[in-house]
Image (spheres, rainbow, N blue to C red):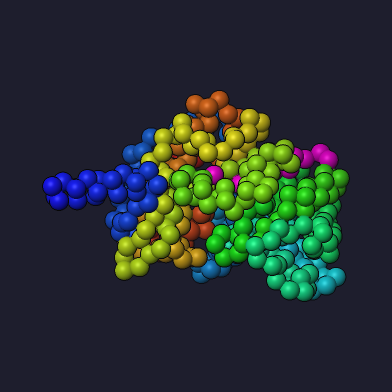
Amino acid sequence: MRLAALTGGVAAMLTLARLSGLRLTRSERRLTDRWRRVAVEPRGSALLGISFRPLQAEALGLDAKATLQTLLDYPFDVVRLGAYWNRMELRPAGFRSDDLDWQIGAAERAGKKIVLCIGPVKSFGYPEFFVPAHQLSRPLPEGTLVDAGSHPSLLAAAIAFATRIVECYRERESIIAWQVEHEAVDPLGMEHSWRLGAGFVADEVAAVRQADPTRPIMMNGFLPTSLPVRLQQWWRTREQGDSLAVARRLADVVGIDYYPRHALVGGGGWGLYLDGSHRRSSRLGTWVDVPRGPMLISEGQAEPWESVTTPPGPAGKAMFSCRPEDVIGNYNRCLAWAQRSCLRLDAYLFWGAEYWVMRQLRGDPHYLQAFIRVLETA
């Protein structure tokens, strides 16, 4: 009787873990050539591309310009670049655009289309918060909504910066869309609990439209793939909806950030993961109101997301959160979902290109080759 009860309890716990997506497993896996054998979904009319994060390149020990130049040599269509406010406005009344000028020029010489994220408060790539220190007299208060009433000077400065970026680059034909904020109204992971108010973001969007009424505005949000993430996202954004909901209301193009597997904690060679990769492609949009208009995968996971900021790259190993075959598998899942759901998917942007270059320089071309295989066969 006790054995039966114990067995039933273990089975129930395993079932609950499966439903929640929780998985305890070894973090490092042996590299294989499985990525060579995974079938690649046809992309149809979707453009393929990457995001480029100069700060991430530097964190990985790379030269940012050389890394971007290496990546631009590959035959993808679109690159997403960021106008990082605190890297362009180093002091009051100061403005330096030379680094972004170079990135845009390099992309144009390579024949790439550009999605330019103008932030201003939040942009893609850690730490995702790029307000210059001189624009904030004190840190944003945790647990609050940041809006025009609480931070009017920040909103005014953000609009001025966004307008300046648009006016500076709107004559560049290579730019096909402006991205306003990044996961605009969601908290900054688990590190901060303040959030931008939807009205704050709406004012930024209006300013960008006024500065350039000819280009679409893209806004992105995180797609939950496990029940704990969905519940947490709902609770933390319940007053005004999450970033995908706000994007549907304000943007012309909705970007979806898709990360099916990431570590919660790790140590001693083990990790506790939230793993939504087992969800069938037809159920990817179960927990969100999927847009029926123009849409792209703004971030398709193609690098590990472990419990540390900079993803590890152990020699001869792959981290469980994203192996080379997952670069293709995650792409496949999104393309299949869009096709089966009759959704218009304009582009798929792979996330993690700097990591691939780092791995290649260390003698492991698997991640980069998996990306190339998609380009060649999709």
Percent x, y for residue 171?
82, 47
Predominant SS along the magenta part: strand
Find residue 314 and report its image quarter: bottom left
Q: Position of residue 177 (x, y in %)?
A: 72, 43
At 62% from the left and 51% from the top, the residue drawn is 237
Q: How many marks?
A: 0
Question: Is 271 part of what is drawn in magenta?
Answer: no
Relative to residue 262, is residue 166 drawn left or right?
A: right
> Residue 80: in sight, yes or no?
no
Q: Which of 350 and 208 lies nearest the eye of the viewer?
A: 208
Q: Residue at x 59, y 34 (%)?
A: 290
- Of 35 and 309, nearer the camera is 309
Residue bounds of the magenta highlight: 213-223
Name, please, the residue furthest toward the front: 1
Q: Quadrant of residue 332?
A: top left
Between 141 and 89, the one nearer to me in the picture: 141
Q: Is residue 215 magenta?
A: yes
Whether residue 287 is visible, yes or no, is yes
Q: Is residue 163 left or right of residue 84?
A: right
Residue sitting at 51 percent across and 46 percent down? 230
204 sits to left or right of 14? right
Rendered location of residue 255, percent (x, y) = 62, 42
In the displayed structure, 178 sits above or below 90; it is above
- Give the residue drawn at x 31%, y 44%: 15
